Image (spheres, helix red, strand yellow):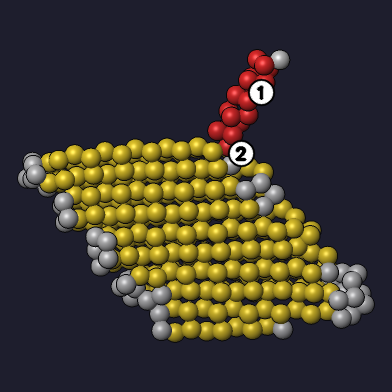
Amino acid sequence: MPSLIIFLLLLSILLIMSQFTNATVRERRQSGGTPVASSGRATAYGSNTDLSSSNSMWKTPNGTVGANGTSSGNAAGAGPSNVMSQSNAMTGANSAFSNGNVNAVGANSKASGMSASNVNGNTLSQSGTDSGSASGKGNSQVIADNMGFVNGNNSATARGRAGATGNILTNVDLSVGQTLNWGSVMFQLSAISSALGENNSQANIMLTGSSLYNPALSAHGLVSGVNDNGGGNVFSRVSANGTGNGNSSQLTGDMLGGVSSKKGGSRLVGAETLTSGNSSSVIFCL
């Protein structure tokens, strides 16, 4: 009997470890009096996961010192999925750092993340992308957060959230990404949320991209419907897409909703705000 208990405990530990995986590489060196370090780290949680991370450091014949760190991860399955990716590169006083996290919650979900940091002499860059999807009945949600720094004070941040509520079907997709070079930044933002429910449903999104040197991008949208007297279905859908490159940016969005009612007493409301730099627009539908 004691041996059976020990066997069951070991089996439980192995099952838990199969849900959560971690990959980390780190290295630190001294190159001709210049401290050099790089790292890549990724963690993932889900029924199915895969991870990778790498790092490298070099010194060219002309004396240029460089370092690079990367990481990526994927997770999918029934229930929640989560991926965290992180990278770092440093040579002397120059450094680049990237960190991202994405969490998807639903009956079925997927999550992916990527991070890369590079320093080559005085040329610095970092980038990160996080994406996720969730679907099912009831509530589905994806939240992503990605940020990076170059030499500590030059930063870029991309964030997003998409959620849907409906007892027949919900589906959300979200992707946020940013790339930062010294004095230059690019953003890619995308979200779509839809829901179908008996008598009520709701879909919502939020996207933001900001940095010290780039006008902020943001989108907030909500579509919600209610059938007070019952006897019909309610559909809600909202989406937005945005790109930014230096001082040039573009942002679009749309909303869609419908209520099927046999007894009257139906309400449908939607609102979406799009902001790009110093310009903004607000759209309402009733």
Tell me the number on the disc at residue 8.
Answer: 1
Q: Nearer the viewer, residue 250 or 275?
A: 275
The correct choice, above or below, for 124 with respect to 1 in the image is: below
Where is residue 260 shown, x and y percent of the image?
84, 72
Q: Amino acid at mark 1?
A: Leu
How far apart, in angstroms, are the residues tagged by discs 2 and 1? 20 Å
**Are the residues flagged by discs 2 and 1 in contact, CB closer than 8 Å?**
no
Q: Amino acid at mark 2?
A: Ser
For image coordinates 24% across by 63% down, the residue present is 182
Q: Which residue is mark 2?
A: 47
The correct choice, above or below, for 192 with respect to 115 in the image is: below
User: Which of disc 1 and disc 2 is earlier in sequence?
Assistant: 1
For image coordinates 79% across by 80% down, the residue present is 267
Q: Is residue 93 left or right of residue 169?
A: left
Work out which quarter of the rendered image holds the N terminus and state it.
Answer: top right
Q: Is residue 169 visible?
A: no
Where is residue 215 shown, x and y percent of the image?
37, 76
Q: Nearer the viewer, residue 75 or 92?
A: 92
For image coordinates 87% across by 69% down, the residue present is 232
Where is residue 17 shown, x and y percent of the image?
55, 33
* Residue closest to the far right: 263
Where is residue 89 shown, x and y percent of the image?
26, 49
Mark 2 is surrounded, within 10 Å at the Cα level, by few (under 14), some (14 to 19) or many (20 or more) other residues, namely some
The correct choice, above or below, for 186 with respect to 254 in the image is: above
Mark 1 is surrounded, within 10 Å at the Cα level, by few (under 14), some (14 to 19) or many (20 or more) other residues, namely few
Q: Is residue 91 visible?
A: yes
Say which element carries label 1.
Answer: helix
Location of residue 32 (image quadrant): top left
